[in-house]
Amino acid sequence: MYYTPLISALLQMFLSRYGFLRPVNWEEMLLDDGEETDKPHDPHFVSALRDFQKLSGLPVTGVLDEATKDAMNKPRCGVPDKPSPKLFDIARRKRHLAALVSKSHARKRREVGGHVAFSKGLLRWRLIGEGYSSQLSVEEQRYVFRLAFRMWSEICPLEFTEDNASPLEEIDIRLGFGTGRHLGCKQRFDGSGREFAHAWFLGDIHFDDDEHFTGSSAGSGISLLKVAVHEIGHVLGLPHIYRPGSIMQPSYRPHESGFEVDWMDRKAIQSLYGGCKGRFDTVFDWVRRERSPRGDVLIRFNTYFMRQGWYWLYENRNNRTRFGDPVSLQSGEQQEKRDPDGRSYPRPISEGFPGSPDGNIYFFKGRQVYAFSVDSNRLARGFPRPLRSVFPALDPQDHPESGLDAAYFSYTHNALFLLKDTRFWRVTGARERRTEPRLQKNTLLPHREIDQQWFDICNVHPTALRLHP
Ligand SMILES: [Zn+2]
Ligand SMILES: [Zn+2]
């Protein structure tokens, strides 16, 4: 294959800049270093081109065909596809400094598969004053970034807060726009087209203000929200992910408008920071009747997890919380204060409440279970009884003993769960006892962690609860 000297130089620059020829120590590299690299006829070069084609989902031809040219000219992130292992050394140093600055938030070190991660749970960010975009109002830029940080916070244990008051060196993530040489950065932006932003692991994010970024309102151009979510992913420790739908793909995908952080991205960030653990005040399925367009009565339900005045609506079908949760109870959906008979709520528990599958309402208190008979309007005979005798454990060593946080009957699983701290115990039902007759009634299966069954129920920082443009 013959390339003109110009094409071959550009091709070489592309492949070496993004780490295909050899891993790039990008944080130390200067763009205009005239470093000698392999030539287009060199086997190294062909294999680098093939790597790029493979990662980009193109036919692997090893030559610069039209499809490959198109892919190379797409708007993309400036972070190399194959960063040097040294990058992680730098990141490690930075993380160490970050830990020293904020000992109060220091967490266990995390290092997974050679990747590093922040060692604290609350991260401060700021859009720096000398780095405002000339294209969007400052309010709109800050709004987009608040939203972008919140999207990560909703799926991992990290919390983010905008901090415009502390000294700059205490800010974990500084964001800014610039053109060409910018913000004292080692890297240079390339004008309009191709590279639109770059980020440092556990560091700062720069956006190329020569690009046409769009804010929350849709339009042609590059969505600042998508780019910000991608670059924050790098700051948190994620490399590029070559999977359709991932926000960490190196090239910008314009098509989807309302996007979410997908399954693979969630798993990637959780491999660095773990899942979201926490205890709940109460969990329930809100069951209601609805009429279908054909007039049939349908039973519908939504699952709500509640904790300290916040709630999450859990989408059982997708096995995760609704996008945009948690919501503060105060600002949530308008709650009905009256039932269909016109009685107002809240009312004392002693007045009783309607509906229960076996005519009893069960109350859990300390080590005891109380069954209240709705029909006779008093404590059922034989109660209270110890939790252990009503709910024996399959493994006697594995029992919550007392002080449950919640008892939750799930219509999705058609089973009762007892919740305490970050754990749950599933209560076996009639179906299990038919297949395993030796099981006693209400036997508790060994505990599991709540976040292993219900995914991504994550706190956000209180400052990120309500977002306004
Ligand atoms: Zn990137
Ligand atoms: Zn920069």
Image (tube, rainbow, N blue to C red):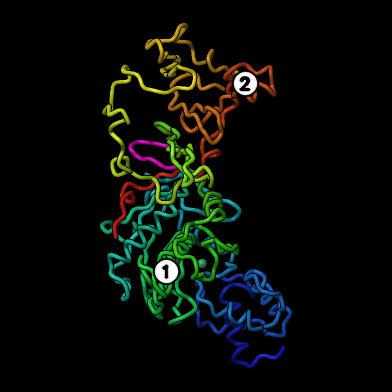
Lateral position of residue 337 relative to residue 236, left or right = left
Residue 83 visible to an observer of this rendering: yes
First to last magenta residue range = 305-314
Residue mark closest to the camera, 2 vs 1: 1
Quarter of the render that holds ligand 2: bottom left
Q: Quadrant of the N terminus?
A: bottom right
Residue tagged by mark 1?
223
Q: Residues within 10 Å of mark 2 (few under 14, many from 20)?
A: few
Looking at the image, is 280 positioned above or below residue 37? above
Looking at the image, is 10 positioned above or below residue 273? below
Q: Position of residue 67 (x, y in %)?
A: 63, 80
Confirm whether the magenta stretch covers residue 307.
yes
Q: Residues within 10 Å of mark 1 (few under 14, many from 20)?
A: many
Residue 437 is drawn in which quadrant?
A: top right
Residue 108 visible to an observer of this rendering: no
Residue tagged by mark 2?
395
Q: Nearer the viewer, residue 194 or 407?
A: 407
Residue at 52% over, 28% down: 417
Confirm whether the magenta stretch covers residue 204.
no
N-terminal of the pair, mark 2 or mark 1, is: 1
Q: Quadrant of the C terminus?
A: bottom left
